Image (tube, rainbow, N blue to C red):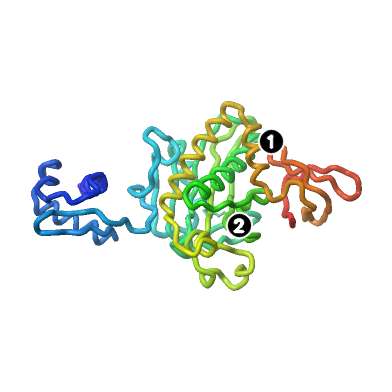
Amino acid sequence: MKNKILKILKEEDKYISGEDISKALNVSRTAVWKHINELRNDGYVIQSSSKKGYRFLKAPDILDKREINIPKGQFIGSNIRYFEEIDSTNSYAKKIANEGCAHGTVVISEVQTMGRGRVGRQWQSDTAEGIWFSIVVRPDLEPENIQVITLAASVAVVEAIKETCGIICGIKWPNDIILNGRKLGGILTELSAEPGHVNYVVVGIGLNANQDLEHFDYEIRQKAISLKMYAGKSISRANLLGSILTRFEKIYKSILLGENRDIIDKWTAYSVTIGKEVKVAYKDMEYFGKALSVASDGRLIVECKDGVTREISAGEIQV
Ligand code: BTN
């Protein structure tokens, strides 16, 4: 009922009387008043006037599904599991994926207590100012071909940031989201597969949205950035998340149609790595050379100083 009232208030966009709401939903005016107070306790700002009724003013900055707009019929995000706090959305997503959750399920948490990054690193996500979420997909692809999903996710993130915040970011191989030379976000993709068959892929995305510099641990302050730090004002996390999910679904569908070339081209256009001199640290080795391109399996092709062209599948690079 509470959500139905919220929907009416949002759609009306001007004052609507308690009586009209109660008639529309066939409930008493006291019930309407009670639910409006509950919405206020959830953080919604709703104006009231004894003559005119109620008027929706502002939603709270939460990533609750009521605030995330995705097109009707979209499968990515049609099933959302929302938490105020969890250890890691990726860990939870893997658990429910093993239990058979629907393709396209999205796990969101305002705060993570044990956020995980690539190569066993920690991911600082102890504040509700960021966007921390994981998408479960069950693609009909060979396990060796799923890397393109991570490339697609980074393209969706960069394009959604451009659309909703007007900010242009870059992608550093393999999938760091970069703004002003600093790390704005990252993607941790985890796979469950058997030979020739993918059970599920969890695409975990972490984005620094509204943190101030002091929110970051001292060790990463020189390297990290948030959208708010760059723009000088807070951004709507819910709008950005809705846009990422919508764009990801579109790109994901194009992968299943075999249109990987388009994704690689977009990834390359946003890349801050391709065409640059890079240092690649891989296991105990270090290579220097020029990053030429990215292959459709996500490998970075580097023309090394020793004359050998190598395809790098994992590791860290410095541009
Ligand atoms: C990286 O190291 O760059 C990847 C960071 C990925 C962080 C996200 S936040 C949501 C999801 N849950 C996690 O525990 N990690 C990913």
Quadrant of image for the C terminus: bottom right
Which tag is nearer the camera, tag 2 or tag 1? Answer: 2
Q: In which quarter of the image is ligand 1?
A: bottom right
Give the image location of residue 14, x and y in percent.
21, 50
Q: Does the residue labelled 2 lie within 8 Å of ligand 1?
A: no
The location of residue 18, given as percent across then percent down, is: 12, 51
Q: Within the image, what quadrant is residue 24 found in?
A: top left
Res. 114 visible in picture? no
From this view, report whether residue 172 is shown above or below residue 102: below
Q: Which amino acid does label 1 sit on?
A: Ser
Question: In the rendering, which numbered label is found on residue 51?
Answer: none
The answer to whether mark 1 is within 8 Å of ligand 1 is: no
Taking the spot 60% from the left edge, 37% from the top edge, the residue there is: 193
Which residue is depicted at the point 83% across and 53% down?
A: 287
Residue on which disc 1 sits: 296
Q: Name the residue under label 2.
A: 179
**Image-based side of 54 in relation to 124, left or right:** left
**Nearer-the-camera pick, 157 or 187:** 157
Please, what is the three-letter code of the amino acid marked with disc 2?
Leu
